[in-house]
Image: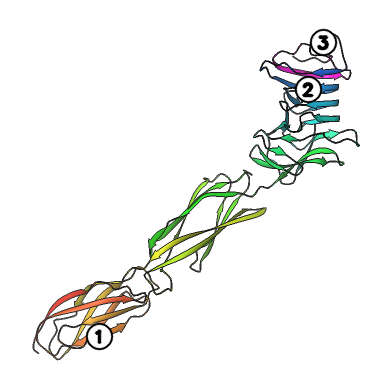
Amino acid sequence: LVRSFVHIFTVSDGALLFNGSADGGFPANGSTPATSFSLNPGNGVHVDFSANGSFGSFNAGDATVSPGILGPGQFSVFRLSLSAASVLKIELNGITPITQYDQLKASLLQIVTPLSPATLDVRVGFTTALNQTFKIIEMTDPARFVEGKFMDPSANVLNEGSTFNAGGVAFRISYVGGDGNDVTLTRVSTPPAFANRSITPTINEGDFVTLSGLITEPDAEDTFFLDVNWGDGTTETFTFVPGTPRQIAVPHRYLDNGNSLTATNAYDVHISWHDAHGGSKSANLRTVVHNMAPQVSGMAFDSAPVRGQNSILRGHVYDPSPLDGIRLRINWGDGSAVETIELPLGATTFQLTHRFAKRGRHLVRVQAIDNDGGKGRDSRLWIDVVNG
């Protein structure tokens, strides 16, 4: 129902659209004109009231009140009363009041049940910028303030300076905005959250862990930054722009189990997260890295060993950690003393020279040992030493 000049209406159900002026008000019961207008249908009936224009006195009852008709507008009233069942719906479709976002003007605004605030329902229809402010209620009497508080649709009471989420972005409400007694909403940044954080609990050196979690960014247009100190001397920053999946997983390889000279080592992983506007939060996780023993393989002599002559033995050695120091323990199987040789850091092959004093069949055994005490299995090679 749309009227440019108001007479008498009975409000029963559905949507009521008002366009014009009724400074003297009109009753809801269909009797005689009065100085006030009330929306109290009862019996579980809810009325959506949208208005462009002005009233004298208005009691919203359990209705939803929205300035503007089918879009932003302005609703002016001398006295507005809201109850715990009332909803004030505000559309934000731009930065210009009345034409792009809703505005309510009142000389006196009462929320008549202070312990049960009225609901403020903000609908955002455009991309807002940080620190933009919207004066949604203009108090025309400079000596009067809003009496009472609003709550958001999730029933969180909005005190002075409270923040709430609407349309995927965060706003801060003020009841002393504008020229000191208006209700304003300011677009603010809410620190993001990083929930369900976890890391692979245990790995072998040389393997990868996976750090995972769920990004919660109330400001849909913000970029999420994750800073990680892996505890092994490396740090990384991961960047997640708007639109990327919110469940994330990032890998990291631990090259060594650390300088603990033990079989295992625990790394404390420090993580922090923030958006471009600051508000950093942090947490600690832990992963355990096990040492892996080096192994010898591929042993062979350059030629058949000859008694009393130098013979060259070659082979490969592998350690999952390129940072481990390795020494070889060699038993030539001919009764000579066991040898120990340090290999250069990072070596993957070796060359050994030995002069056999006895002919016959011998078992050559070579074992690799790392600086964390990890001992590989013996690599064995039977050889026949012949006379020269």
Answer whether residue 257 is magenta in the image.
no
Is 157 situated above or below 286? above
The residue at which mark 1 appears reads as 339
Classified by dominant secondary structure, the portion drawn in magenta counts as loop
Q: Which mark is residue 383?
A: none
Residue shown at the point (74%, 21%) measured from the top left? 49
- Give the residue type at disc 1: Glu
Quarter residue 160 falls in:
top right
Question: Percent from the top left, x then y, of residue 227?
Answer: 56, 59
Answer whether residue 7 is magenta in the image.
yes
Identify the element where label 2 is drawn: strand
Is 69 situated above or below 310? above
The residue at which mark 2 appears reads as 51
Q: Which span is picked out in magenta? A: 4-30
Question: Percent from the top left, x then y, of residue 94?
Answer: 74, 36
C-alpha gap between disc 1 and disc 2: 97 Å
Quarter residue 287 falls in:
bottom left
The residue at which mark 3 appears reads as 8
Quarter residue 172 falls in:
top right
Question: Percent from the top left, x then y, of residue 126?
Answer: 68, 37
